[in-house]
Amino acid sequence: MQSGNERLPVFKRVGGFLLIIIVLIASFLLGIKLIGMFSSHEPVPESFLAAGSFFNSTIAIVLSAIALTAAVVAYAVTFLTSCFTFDFNKPFFASFKKKLYLINIAVGLGLSLAIGFIISVPITPILIHHGLPEPLPFIIPILASLICVQLTMVWINIWAPLNRAVVRKRAIVLGVAPPDLAKGVLVGVSDPGKSSFKKLTLVEDDVGVLWIEPDRLVYRGDTENFVLKREDMISVKCKADAGSMASYAGAAYPILQYRSSDGSEQSIRLHSWGSWSLGGLSKSLRLITSKLKSWQLRTPAENS
């Protein structure tokens, strides 16, 4: 069995986050440049500022409230409807990933507009006083808030409660009793032989519950199920997934290598499911890996 975690090197982790920041800033600057090409190239007159513009304080606050309300309502409706999933008697995860991807964009945009409009109240007059041509003083706060919200949502998973809820609902429908559900670990699974860079939505192929029993591992998922006996296990190792943002926060995913019934060697990668942040995800993965390695060595798992 291999020991140690094969995490991404520090320079790659730092470089990954820097690349995201550079792309967002470049997009911001490109947006400013394109908007500037269609602007009047004349500074907004002081009389215009004094008389009040479309983005005066009152209107900006109203627009901010509307955008925030829309984002909150979209989030609440998505959670209450399990991301518009009304039947857990059949597999749900393939469509769930696509719907959540689009809704996440919409909620993030609503939050960005809400923050952008409210910060435009003090920022827009300052930009106008510095001679920026219309409409740049009104657009810059919104674009800046969009960057900040996107960076925040990279680190924080606002859908953590929803992610946990849908897996539990599906497991109960599949016949898992609530007491047994409480003993399991919510995980996702994927093929470590396939690049996650090609996946536009979530990197997990399936989600479900994993039970670490004395002599076997039992997984019950949305579409996949497996039982791995201790004698079939070859190794439990950790490896970063360069296509997953959590790896750039120091996460390394447990990979189970085992021998199938036909004697061939197979592997499956586990993902912690339902963490609030990349930091929490990394910690949860370390705990799962510790328990799995201890299970394979027939010793009590740490933090069990």
Image (cartoon, rainbow, N blue to C red):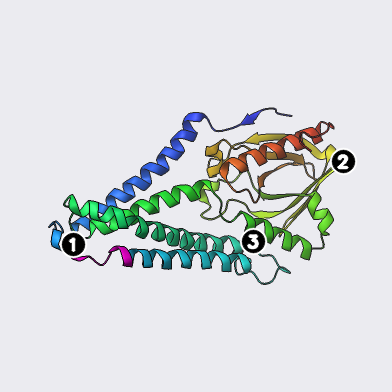
Q: Residue at 57% across / 66% down in the picture?
A: 76
Q: Amino acid at mark 2?
A: Pro
Tag on residue 234?
Answer: none
The disc, 3 or 2, on the residue closer to the chain's N-terminal end is 3
Examine the structure image and report whether residue 116 is included in the region drawn in magenta.
no
Tag on residue 50?
Answer: 1
Marks 2 and 1, how far apart at CA:
75 Å
Q: Position of residue 271 (x, y in %)?
A: 65, 46
Q: Residue at 49% across / 50% down in the picture?
A: 153
How many residues crowd around disc 1 within 10 Å: few (fewer than 14), some, or many (20 or more)?
few
Marks 3 and 1, how far apart at CA:
54 Å
Quarter of the image where the N terminus is located: top right
Q: Position of residue 104 (x, y in %)?
A: 51, 59
Q: Amino acid at mark 3?
A: Phe
Q: Secondary structure at mark 2?
A: loop
Tag on residue 214?
Answer: 2
Tag on residue 93?
Answer: 3
The disc, 3 or 1, on the residue closer to the chain's N-terminal end is 1
The answer to which of 90 and 155 lies nearer the viewer is: 155
Q: Residue at 67% across / 56% down in the picture?
A: 164
Q: Are marks 3 and 1 in contact (CB under 8 Å)?
A: no
The disc, 2 or 1, on the residue closer to the chain's N-terminal end is 1
Which dot, 2 or 1, sits closer to the camera? 1
How many residues crowd around disc 3 within 10 Å: few (fewer than 14), some, or many (20 or more)?
many
The answer to which of 221 and 172 lies nearer the viewer is: 172
What is the span of residues highlighted in magenta in the rendered image? 48-59
Q: Is residue 156 left or right of residue 207?
A: left
Q: Residue furthest top?
A: 3
How many residues crowd around disc 2 within 10 Å: few (fewer than 14), some, or many (20 or more)?
few
Which dot, 3 or 1, sits closer to the camera? 1
